[in-house]
Amino acid sequence: MTFVVFILMLVIRQVIFVNTEDCRTKENLNHEFAVNCDFLKLTLIPSMVRFGLNPIKFISISGDANNLNNIPTIRKTDFQAVSRVTSLVISWSQVKTVEDGAFEKMADLKTLSLTDNELESLNATTFAGIPLLKELDLSGNRICKFDETIFNNIQSISVLNLGDMNLLFIREDFFNSLHSLRVLKLYTNHIKTVSENLILNLPALENLDLSANQLQTIPVEWKPKFQTMKRVHLVENPLHCNCLLAWLQEQPYQTTLDSGSLVCNGPQKLRYSSFLNVPDRDFVCIPPKVLHCEQSTYSVGVNQQLSIVCEYGGDPVPEIKWTRPDGQVYDGRNTSEGGYHVAENGTLLIYRVLMSDNGLWKVTAYNQTTSDNMLINVIVRKAERTEPQTIPPIFKPEDCNFIHNEAAISSTVPVIKISKILEKGSPKADVATAGIDMGNIYWVLLAAIASAAGAMVGLLCLLIMFCKRNKKPNRSNQIRAFEHDI
C-alpha cells in the first residue's frame, strides 16, 4: 500500500511540475525548484500557480535574437504566487513596461535580470518591495529612460549592469547611494566624458567596465581609486595619449588595467600605437588655439540669422566658449540656450540677432592646460523705417474708352480746343508753364464734352415738353362719359 501511494505521488508530481505550458522544472538537493521557460515564444508570463506548492527559487523566461518572446508588460499579478523566488530572469522578451510594484511580493529576490528587452522607462516604484536585491542587470535596453531615483528601494545592490543602453552622459552623483556597489558595468554606450567624482564615492567598488565608449581621457583624480580596485576595462575607447593620460602608465595600474590591449587614437603621430609602448616623453599636450575665423567683422540686420564659423586646435581637443558683448556666456560644444546654439564643431549660431548682440564677441578655446581667445566684431543694423508712399494714379485715355481725335467727335458736340483755353490766360502761355500735364488736358477735354452733352440733353428735354404741350386735345371737343349714355 505504501508503495502504491509513493508511485501516485510521483505521477502527481510529474503532472503538476513537468511541461506545464512546456516550461521545464528541475529540483535541487534542497528540494528547491527552478522553472525554465526559455525559447517558447511566449506572449505572457506563465501562471506560476500551476507549479504547485513546492518552493520555486529560480525562474527563467528568455529567448534569443532568433527566438523572441512577445511579452509587452510585466504585470503586478504575474509573480504573486512565488514569493520565495531568489533569482528571476526575463530577457529577449520585448518587454516595454513594468507595472509599479510588479516584484513587491518577491521579498527574497536577490538577482533580477531584464536584459535585451525594449523597456521604455523605469522609476523607484518599479523595484519596490525587493530590498534584498544584490544584482541588477538592465543591459541591452537601448531606449530606456530613468534617473538615480530607481535605486531608492534597492540601495544594497552590489552588481549593476547598465551596458549597451545608449547612455550619453552620467551625472557625477548618479551612484552615490550605492555604498555596497562592487561591480559597475557601463560598456558599449556613447559616453564621451566622465566626471572626476563619478566613482570616488563608491567605497566598495572593485570592478569597473567602461569599454567601447567614446572616452578620450580618464580623470587623474581616479588615480588613488585605481590603487584599491581589482579590474578596470577601458579598451575600445579613442584615447588621446597626451599629458593627461601619462599617469595611467605608472605602476601598479598596469596590473589593474587591461592596458595591454589599449591603443592610442591620438595625437596623429601616436595613432594606433600600443599604449604600453609609448615613451613617457611623448605624453605631451598641445595648448588650445583659435586658429582662425571666417570673418573678423560681421554686419547683420536685427532679427536676422547669424553664424560665426571658426577653427580650433589643441590636444586635448579644446572646449569652446562664446561670450556676448554684455558678458552673457554660452559654454560648451553642442549646447543651446535661448536663441543661441554652439555646434559640435564650435560654430556659434544666433537664430535672431538682437541689439544686445552688437559689439565685440569673444570666442575662447580651452582645455585642462590653458586657453586662447579671439575677438569678433558684430555690427547690428537697426531696422529701417520707411514711410508708405502714395503714388497718384496715372490717367490713361484708353481706360475711358473714348476717342480723343477731333475728327471723330460728333458734329453735334462743340469742340473746345486747348489752345483757345490757354489764350484766355497770359499771352504765349504754354502747357508746362500753366502746370497742366497731359492727364489734366484729357480731364479738361472730358469735362467740356460732358458739359456740352449736358446742355444738349437739357435742350432736347425742353423741346420735347414744348411739342407735347402743342399736341394736347381741345377739352371742348371731348365727349364726356355721360353724353355717351344719352
Image (spheres, helix red, strand yellow):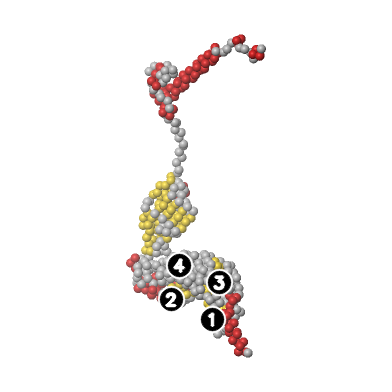
Q: Residue furthest left?
A: 269
**The C terminus lies in which quarter of the figure?**
top right
**Distance in Å between CA atoms under marks 2 and 4:** 22 Å
Q: Nearer the viewer, mark 4 or mark 1?
A: 1
At label 4, the amino acid type is: Asn
Question: Which of the 4 quarters of the picture holds residue 286?
Answer: bottom left
Number of marks: 4
In the rendered image, the vertical position of residue 74 relative to residue 358, given as above or below:
below
**Distance in Å between CA atoms under marks 2 and 3:** 42 Å
The answer to whether residue 99 is left or right of residue 336 is right
Residue 256: percent from left, percent from top: 43, 76
Residue 320: percent from left, percent from top: 42, 58
Q: Which residue is mark 4?
A: 189
Where disc 3 sits, the SS reads loop
At label 2, the amino acid type is: Thr
Determine contact: label 2, label 4, CB under 8 Å: no
Where disc 2 sits, the SS reads helix
In the rendered image, the vertical position of residue 436 relative to residue 298, given as above or below:
above
Count residues near mark 4 (Cα–Cα under 10 Å), then give few for <14, some for 14-19, many for 20+.
Answer: many
Residue 162: percent from left, percent from top: 49, 70
Q: Residue furthest top?
A: 476
Question: Which of the 4 quarters of the picture holds residue 331?
Answer: bottom left
**Distance in Å between CA atoms under marks 1 and 2:** 40 Å
Viewer-proximal residue among 462 and 429 = 462
In the rendered image, the vertical position of residue 307 relative to residue 150, given as above or below:
above
Q: For residue 50, which numbered disc appears in the image?
A: none
Q: Which residue is mark 3?
A: 45
